[in-house]
Image (cartoon, helix red, strand yellow):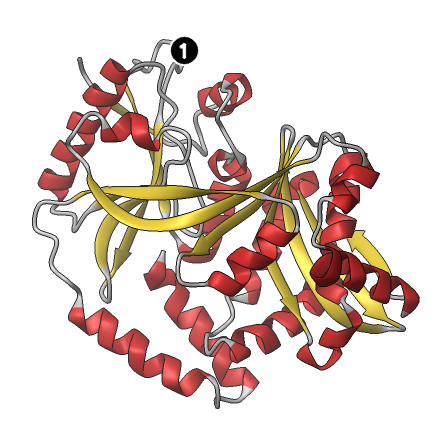
Amino acid sequence: MPIYTIDPLRDPRWNTLLGSSQIAGIFHTSGWLQALHDTYRYRPVVFTTSAPTSSLDNGVIFCDVSSWVTGRRLVSLPFSDHCDTLVNSQEEARELLAGIQEEMKSEKLRYVEFRSYLTGRFLEEIGTLTSGESFLLHTLSLEPQHHDLFQAMHKDCIQRKIRRAERESLRYVVGSNDLLINQFYGLLIRTRRRHSLPPQPLQWFRNLLHCLNDSIAVHVAYKSDQPVAAMITLQFKQTITYKYGCSDERFANLGGTPFLFWKVIEYGKHLGMTQLDLGRTELENSGLATFKDRLGARRELIQYHRISETMKPNTHASWLATTAKLAFTYLPDSILVASGKLLYRHIG
C-alpha cells in the first residue's frame, strides 16, 4: 500500500479528520502546529495511506526537527505531552510504520519518536518500535459535582490551602490577552530559575495566544494587584489541558497554586468540559506527582516509542545541557531569557 505525506497546515482534510476522531487532542490541531512552526520553524508533516484525491482516513503527525546540536529527527510532537497516531486498524499502523521507517533511512534521521498515549500499546504490538522515555500522566474527571470534586482533594495539602487563599482574598482573572501573558511570563522566569532552567521564549506564548484563539486561556491569581500564581490551559472538544504553571515563591504560603487549580476545575466545568488533563510528570519528580494525586487525579504510565537504527548518544548535547544548567540559577534575567530563546529550538 502506498504511503503519502501531506502538509496539515494547508490540507483541509486534516481538520476534518480531527473533528471525526475520538482520540485527537489539542496537540494535533492546526493552531498548535502553526505555533510550533512560527516559533521554532518546525515543519509539520502527516503520513497517511489515504490518496490525495480521497478523504483522509488516517494520519500520523510529526514535526521535522533539525538541529546542529541534537541532530535531525521526526517527533510526534515537540513540546507536546502526548499525541496519538490516528489509525483505524493494526494493519494501517503497520503500513504507516513501514513507510515512516523508510523515510528515516532515506533522510538519514537520528530517530523517529512517537508520543502516543491511547495507542501506545497498540503500536508496541507491531514490534518494530523500541521503548523511549516514560512519564506519569494524570487526568481528572470533571463529571462529578463541585462538592464531590472538592471533597476528593487532600484535606490538608489542597482543601486547606484553597480556603487559606480565599481568606487572603486572592483575586482570580482568566482571559487571553497580552497583559495576562506578560504577567504569566514574569512568574515563569522566577519559576524556571528556581528549577535551574531557562524559560521558553516569550514569543512561543504569544504565538500560542494568536494561533489557538478561543482554545487557550491564561489564569492568574493576585494578592491585591500582585500576580502570585499563573497557569495556561488549552481546550479541545471536552478536554481542558493544564499545560504551563508558575508562581512567585515569596507568596507560596497564600495557597495560590491550589487555588488556581480549583478555579481551573470550575472554569472547565463551566465550559462543559468532562476531563482535566494535568499533563505529564517525570518519573523522578515525586513531589509533582504526589501533588497531582492530591488533586484527586488518576495517574497512569505513558510510554514513548522510537524507531531508531543507529541511536548514538549525543554527548555534545548532553554536555551542553549539564554545563548550562549549572549557570542558569545565577544568570541575569535578560541572559536567562536569551538562553531559552536560543536553546529550546534544539530540544523539541
Residue placed furthest toward the top: 54
Q: Residue at x 49, y 19 (%)?
A: 21
Image location (x, y in percent) of residue 227: 77, 71
Splitting the image into 4 quarters, where does residue 269 fall? Answer: top right
Image location (x, y in percent) of residue 249: 67, 78
Q: Is residue 7 above or below residue 42?
A: above
Q: What SS does tag 1 mark?
A: loop
Image location (x, y in percent) of residue 57: 38, 14
Of residues 114 and 259, the one nearer the viewer is 259
Image location (x, y in percent) of residue 302: 39, 42
Of residues 35 and 301, the one nearer the viewer is 301
Kind of residue at disc 1: Ser
Q: Residue at x 75, y 71 (%)?
A: 228
123 sits to left or right of 228? left
262 sits to left or right of 333? right
145 sits to left or right of 277? right
Of residues 274 and 342, the one nearer the viewer is 274
Q: Is residue 44 visible?
A: yes
Q: Badge 1 is on which residue? A: 55
Q: How many marks?
A: 1
Residue placed furthest toward the front: 155
Query: Around disc 1, counting alpha carbons within 10 Å, would you say few (fewer than 14), some (14 to 19), or many (20 or more)?
Result: few
Q: Is residue 243 visible?
A: no
Q: Is residue 120 above or below residue 277?
A: above
Splitting the image into 4 quarters, where does residue 275 fall? Answer: top right
36 sits to left or right of 267? left
Q: Residue at x 38, y 61 (%)?
A: 345
Q: Residue at x 58, y 73 (%)?
A: 191
Quarter of the image that includes the N terminus: top left
